[in-house]
Image (spheres, coloured by chain):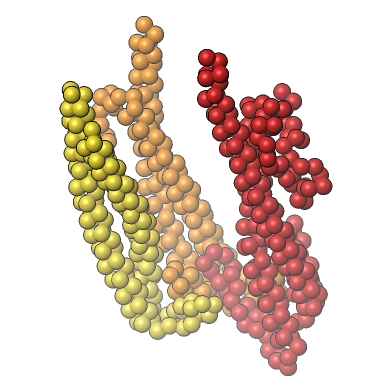
Chain colours: A yellow, B orange, C red
Amino acid sequence: MGSMAKTKSELEKVIAEVRDMQKDVGKITNQQINLNSQLTENRLVEQELSLLKDDAEVFKLIGPVLIKQDLLEAKGNVSKRINFITSEMKRTDDQMALLEQKQETKRKQIMDLQMKLQEQAKQGAVQ
Amino acid sequence: MESQEGTLPLGSLNIEQLQNVQKSTEQEVQSLTEQLTQLTTAQQRILSSKRLAKEFGKQPEGKEILLPLSGSVYVQGKLCDTSTAMVDLGTGYYALKTLEEAEEYFQRRAAVIKDNVDKGTQALVQRRQMYEAVTSVLQQKMAAAQRQGAS
Amino acid sequence: MGDEADLSWVVHGHADEHFGIPKVIFFDDVEKVVKEHEVQNTLQNLTALFQRYKFWETKFMKNKQGLQQKIPDVKRTIDVVKTLQKRSNSDIDEPITTRFELGDQIYVKAEIPKSDSVSLWLGANVMIEYKHEEAIELLQKNLETAETNLEHLESHLNFIRDQVNVTEVNMTRVYNYDVLQRRKQPEASE
């Protein structure tokens, strides 16, 4: 019977770990949503900048001040930003995949422990 | 996931599973409805700005106006350039455009949003249908279970 | 049935109210309270009171958020008028050129000639022209009122939070007392 208690506490521990992982999954999902919307917005700006004539005037809002930008420089900055966001998205995707893998392993552990618990209960009952 | 759910035999699910599916579909319907509302609001704003760009060009230069400076403060002023507008492109970037170019810009934005609205509406309709299907199967099963229990 | 709305014995009198919000009585002697008012009745009343407090809390939180948004707006407006005032008092005669928001995402140019007055939108379709000093005075008064109201709201919210705690403690103690009594009863009847 003592071993049952041990298995039970192991089980509870793993369940708690899975729960924590779920929280992390939530966090990463939020990051992904955020990055996605930033990407969309920046892509729109990129498109619009490309439609401008060469002598068009662009400005950037820095704090409360609107500052004139060089069109080529602006295009470059937006492009750099898009690259950064894309690489961040890849990073979070990888993070997410890793986390899901770990969760799978833990879930299998839970099933194994649950079966073990059932076995122990049967043995205990027989005695 | 879409095709899986489309071919998911609802009849083979038990009551508890059906209730779960019902709940999750209900939540999806709610969040899709919310998204759609946001999109249509954005759409209205864009179309309104497009109209303003068009109308503004008809104003005479030098026209006296009361313009807002911040919060609820207005001052008297004169229009001094009715051929250009500064347009907010997003991510903090602004571009000086002619009114025509501004109109075209808003038209482009409106087209993108309309696209999203259409997709969103489609998804919403689909989810609603799913919800209704699950609910109906669930009700049937629950009624059957009651009859069994009664006998 | 009249007990439902009758919270009079659960709270202190008017003298202890905080701006009209009643102060809950802390049940020192749970046994006495239960003997006089019975467990069910007591818990019902406490729950009703608890819900009222929660309702007030939500309402005040909303008001607080509204004010927290409004106050920086008013401050900014005051700054704008002060800037205009400075300029009109200076020797600069040229009009200010600016771009104002014509609509969402679109800004157009306008010239603002030297002037000693502004128009304030007061709401309810009313806009009034004020000299700069008058406008600043009015806005300052609004700011002070808003800031005072915010302080009041904070104190209301603190008071309510205390009352909620005491109410919850009362409920727990009454409930625990009841459980204890029920456990004793079977022994007593045997």
Question: Extreme bottom residue here?
Answer: C91
Which residue is found at the position 63% from the left and 26% from the top? Answer: C40
Nearer to me, A23 or A79: A23
Nearer to me, C174 or C62: C174
The answer to whether residue B50 is left or right of residue C41 is left
The x, y position of residue C124, in whole percent, is 75, 57
Residue C153 location, quadrant: bottom right
Residue C128 location, quadrant: bottom right
Nearer to me, B150 or C161: C161
Which residue is found at the position 33% from the left and 79% from the top? Answer: A76
The x, y position of residue A26, in whole percent, is 35, 52
The answer to whether residue B14 is left or right of residue C79 is left
**Above-or-below relation of C120 to A14:** below
The x, y position of residue A72, in whole percent, is 35, 82
The x, y position of residue B115, in whole percent, is 38, 52
The answer to whether residue B73 is left or right of residue A32 is right
Q: Is residue C20 visible?
A: yes
The answer to whether residue B151 is left or right of residue C110 is left
Which residue is found at the position 68% from the left and 69% from the top? Answer: C74
Question: Extreme top residue here?
Answer: B151
